[in-house]
Image: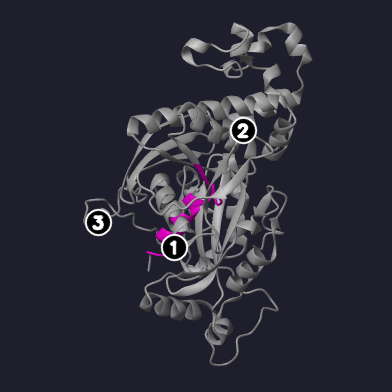
Amino acid sequence: MGPGRLGAPMERHSSVVATSTSSTQDPAPEEPDGRRQEPLRRRANSASAPAPAEGARRERPGSFSGAALVSRQRVESLKKNRPLFPWFGLDIGGTLVKLVYFEPKDITAEEEEEEVESLKSIRKYLTSNVAYGSTGIRDVHLELKDLTLCGRKGNLHFIRFPTHDMPAFIQMGRDKNFSSLHTVFCATGGGAYKFEQDFLTIGDLQLCKLDELDCLIKGILYIDSVGFNGRSQCYYFENPADSEKCQKLPFDLKNPYPLLLVNIGSGVSILAVYSKDNYKRVTGTSLGGGTFFGLCCLLTGCTTFEEALEMASRGDSTKVDKLVRDIYGGDYERFGLPGWAVASSFGNMMSKEKREAVSKEDLARATLITITNNIGSIARMCALNENINQVVFVGNFLRVNTIAMRLLAYALDYWSKGQLKALFSEHEGYFGAVGALLELLKIP
């Protein structure tokens, strides 16, 4: 979704909700548990909407059109206690925007006859394309089919694009006249706060901001409960250190609690989850996926995350890192440190000769190993402190990143002497967006 490209080709991540009202508005009502609800902004006067273009389709006599049709649909939707279509969930992260879209597949003939053109256009474009502009991608392989949400049957689509293209997405919403659909966007992630005013002033769209960790938990529990089109959502690696014997195997997360949830995005957050309503943020680190990509851009000149991973797959980190054997000449037996363990990340780069001998691929591999080892080490310590032996790694850092996943799996198993198991999920980066969608469905 390159800047300026969305409008043309794209016709197409504590439970406190932040308050966006001004000081002149009435206080927000409180939930039974004392939390304040976030009042949704009133939409701008519909009189400011543009007049229909010349040649626009004329409605048949007796049919509903414009505001009258939307009003009727809204009344019918309220009766069924569900929001109007379209149904979206947004997770606006520091690097990527993740969007989930529910495509209804049980539309009746009457609904199709009365459906406004802008809604048809949105559905058709989102579901008939796999790329949007130059950077927007629909992950077709992740589509969940035959789901039932709020009594409606349909498919769930997963779409991502870079956060720097968010202004173009908002402009596309304006161009597609999203606001005429009385759509509420439920959004989570830091960008829900950063772009709130742009949604309102440019797109004339209401934005309901949601806590990202709440959405993350709701999303992962829901997706795990529905599975992956008859397959398991969760998996682990058997023999992760052996390229020939390594296998990706399904894991049944039927007894998920307690679990340690490690969310690796631009940075890292680590949560201890004891039940669906009892969880806490244990710690985190600023060294995450954004660090890996940023350093690779500096060290290798790569321009995409995929390019950085491809370079890393061809590199040799031992030319960059100083290992235990480089210091001891072998294992450090007294403390059980094998010779292949990293003693100092990038430690060999102190030598001019070794700097001149390394390739960009070696530097990319060493960067990936450094970031992954740090995350694994912190996750292991948190698991020990919380007395948890199931560790679930999620987040877009793991997308198409088998090297990091296998390293995490091996490191946790090795250093815990088999007590800790690293688990992964097919929809690794979309749980926040799914959680936002689930919150939308609570809004009548």
For the C terminus, give its image quadrant: bottom left
Does 214 appear above or below 203? above
Q: Is residue 112 left or right of residue 352?
A: left
> Residue 408 sits in which quadrant?
top right
Q: Which residues are magenta?
A: 423-442
x and y percent of residue 59 in the render?
60, 86
Q: Residue at x 73, y 7 (%)?
A: 352
Q: Label 2 sits on what residue type?
A: Ala
Sort mark 2 into few (<14), some (14-19) or many (20+) by Cα contacts within 10 Å.
some
Q: Label 1 sits on what residue type?
A: Arg
Does 420 appear above or below 142? above
Q: Label 3 sits on what residue type?
A: Glu
Residues at badges 3 and 1 in contact (C-beta under 8 Å)? no
Q: Is residue 198 visible?
A: no
Q: Which residue is mark 3?
A: 31
Q: Residue at x 67, y 78 (%)?
A: 56
* Foreground disc of the pair 1, 2: 2
**If you read the primary sequence from the N terminus, does the residue marked by circle 3 or circle 1 appear first?**
3
Residue 433 shown in magenta: yes
Q: Which residue is mark 2?
A: 241
Q: Is residue 431 visible?
A: yes
Q: Secondary structure at mark 3?
A: loop
Real-space CA distance between mark 1 and mark 2, rounded to the nearest whole angstrom = 56 Å
x and y percent of residue 309 in the render?
69, 35
Q: Which residue is mark 1?
A: 43
* Foreground disc of the pair 3, 1: 3
Colour pattern of the rendering: one colour
- Total residue callouts: 3
x and y percent of residue 355 in the render?
73, 12
Residue 377: which numbered mark, if any?
none
